[in-house]
Amino acid sequence: MNYNRFILVLIMSFFVLSNCSQKPAYGMIIPDYKWSYEELKSEYKQCRGKGQLISKGELQGKLTFYFTVRNDSTYIQFRDFLGRRTLYLQLLGNEVYAWDILQDKWFLTTQIQSQYPFLIVLEPTDLTRYFWGIDPQLRGKEYPKDFMFDHKSISISFQTKPDAVGSMVSKAMFQINDNQNQIEIEIKEREYGMSYPRLIRAIPPTILHN
């Protein structure tokens, strides 16, 4: 499995575990927010940070990423262990765009949803909330009756840590109990009111029309 394929599997695993048809068990630490989600966006407008994605079990690996969140849009750049830029994600409102940089391919929302139907359930704004440091509020979501996922036991937990603006969500952990696979997405650094301008870029026309 090449590095780009590995990254795609891990990212899509995040969406799968957040939206399995059988309701997961949650271990939630309620953040002590100084701000509501809307107040945070209004005050700071943008946020940037760095983190890592770790997979344990059948797929083992560690990837780094850096991101910029601007209001309801998120821009994420992943790198492999060689430091190469691999997958670039844009979450623009409720639209998802994925650019496989190594393969020079661009995937639109409908293409991603066609291959991964669970993305119809999870809204990109849920993930944007997480990168802001706010609880994505996955509990209570309604799932389509025909939506199925093989795994029987899923647990999802979030951890918080003190930040400049309060105790914010910094880690998401997904555990598949029947085969002991685990995925952790941890934000190591977060700066409010700052951005990585190079992440906020237009789709290259040559890629968009391929």
Image (tube, rainbow, N blue to C red):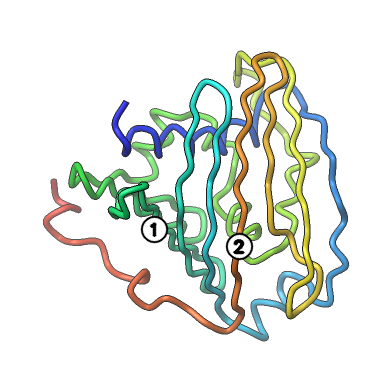
Residue 84's place in the image compared with 43, above or below, is: above
Q: Locate the N terminus by quadrant.
A: top left
| Residue in the picture at 84% in, 61% down | 31
User: SS at mark 1?
Assistant: strand
Counting from the top left corner in percent of width and height, residue 153 is at 74, 19
- Of discs 1 and 2, which sits in the foreground? 2
Whether pointer 1 and pointer 2 mark residues with C-beta atoms closer than 8 Å, the reply is: no
Q: CA distance from mark 1 to mark 2?
A: 15 Å
Counting from the top left corner in percent of width and height, residue 112 is at 39, 37
Amino acid under label 1?
Gln
User: SS at mark 2?
Assistant: strand
Amino acid under label 2?
Lys
Q: Quadrant of residue 46?
A: bottom right
Counting from the top left corner in percent of width and height, residue 78 is at 39, 53
Outermost residue toward the front? 82
> Does 66 sit left or right of 203 as displayed?
right
Work out whether residue 206 or residue 63 is closer to the camera in this orientation and state it. Answer: 63
> Does 164 sit left or right of 34 as displayed?
left
Question: What residue is shown with label 1?
Answer: 77
Counting from the top left corner in percent of width and height, residue 34 is at 84, 77
| Residue in the picture at 79% in, 41% down | 139
| Residue in the picture at 37% in, 78% down | 197
Q: Residues within 10 Å of mark 2 (few under 14, many from 20)?
A: few
Q: Quadrant of residue 113?
A: top left
Question: What residue is shown with label 2?
Answer: 188
Q: Earlier in the sequence, mark 1 or mark 2?
A: 1
Work out whether residue 145 or residue 130 is closer to the camera in this orientation and state it. Answer: 130
Residue 96's place in the image compared with 74, above or below, is: above
